[in-house]
Amino acid sequence: MGPSGFTISGCEISPIKYRPNRSKAILMFELRGRGPDGKPVQRSIIGRFTREYKEDRTPFDLMEELWQDGFGSDSDLRVCEPLLYVPARGLVLVSKASGTDLQTMSESASELLPTAAKRAGDWIAKLHRTRVRNGRVRPMADEETTIRDGVGTAVAKLSSNHPSLSGRANGLVRRILAVARLIDKPSTTLVHGDYLPRNIFFDGSTVTAIDLDGCSLFDPAKDLGKLLGRLAVNVKLYDLPFREASLRSTVLSAYSEEVPEELLRRAAAYEAILFVKQSKREADPQAAEYWLDRAEERVDERH
């Protein structure tokens, strides 16, 4: 987990995501020590504990393959370096991503946001074109269950907060599923699975995507839709001095010279999911209805 001769003299552990009696936890280990030359060295390592890691090392093997096949330290589009897999503990150790995540940049209205949006498009385009095929195939039936559960929970909360929107909200579950199902054959594209701004870090020209546990062979529309949808929410939520359409165009232009219409159509389902979830967070009825309107527009729009 470091250069040869590195001697650890201390370690501070802090929780990033931890709740007692839960099956998942994320901790940060701050290592202190000295390198081969005797100079002080510090290194930050992320430890991810989950029950699934005890049974399946595929996510770790996938990160290793990506690291060795174009997403390592010799590239400015990379993943965190995989360091250690401990199946008995359900533990994976990876290097900590440096820099600032795209969500934080959005919340602070960073002037670098358009550039970061382009680079986010570059990163996901590279992943979708990778030769790495070590991911698990995600069945559409599993995705439908995830969508139905996630949107259903959001709709129930929205209906409780704003009963007048209940009928429209409930109708969206079926329509979102119908759009997501438009893929005509199983995909062999490696997708991130949770490609949201909070999982994309920028440090100068270097882009690092984290949280690759959900990587699988699936529809690339999922990654595009999640990124575009969250950026749209951020523009409105934080009153950003950037046009949503401009950021969207920036991402898509970086992704491909010509994005297939059918891909954009399916991506709209994932944008709509984020809009429904934002709607249920809104205490103001007009704000909730705005995001519900946006969700309906996305699933009904013909690209």
Image: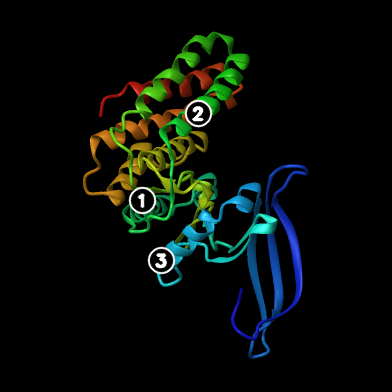
Position of 302 with respect to 111 (left or right) is left
Q: Residue furthest bottom?
A: 37
**Residue 228 percent across, percent down from the top left:** 40, 39
Quadrant occupied by the N terminus: bottom right
Label 2 sits on residue: 145
Residue 300 versus residue 147 in the image, above or below: above
Residue at (66% x, 74% y) in the render: 42
Q: Earlier in the sequence, mark 2 or mark 1?
A: 1
Residue 284 in view (yes/no): no
SS state under label 1: helix
Dot 3 or dot 1, earlier in sequence: 3
Q: Which residue is mark 1?
A: 121
Question: Alpha carbon of mark 3 to alpha carbon of mark 1: how far?
Answer: 13 Å
The residue carrying pointer 3 sits among few (fewer than 14), some (14 to 19) or many (20 or more) residues within 10 Å by Cα, namely: some
Amino acid type assigned to the residue bearing label 3 in the image: Asp
Residue extending farthest to the left is 258
Identify the residue position indicated by label 3 in the image: 76
Q: Nearer the viewer, mark 2 or mark 1?
A: 2
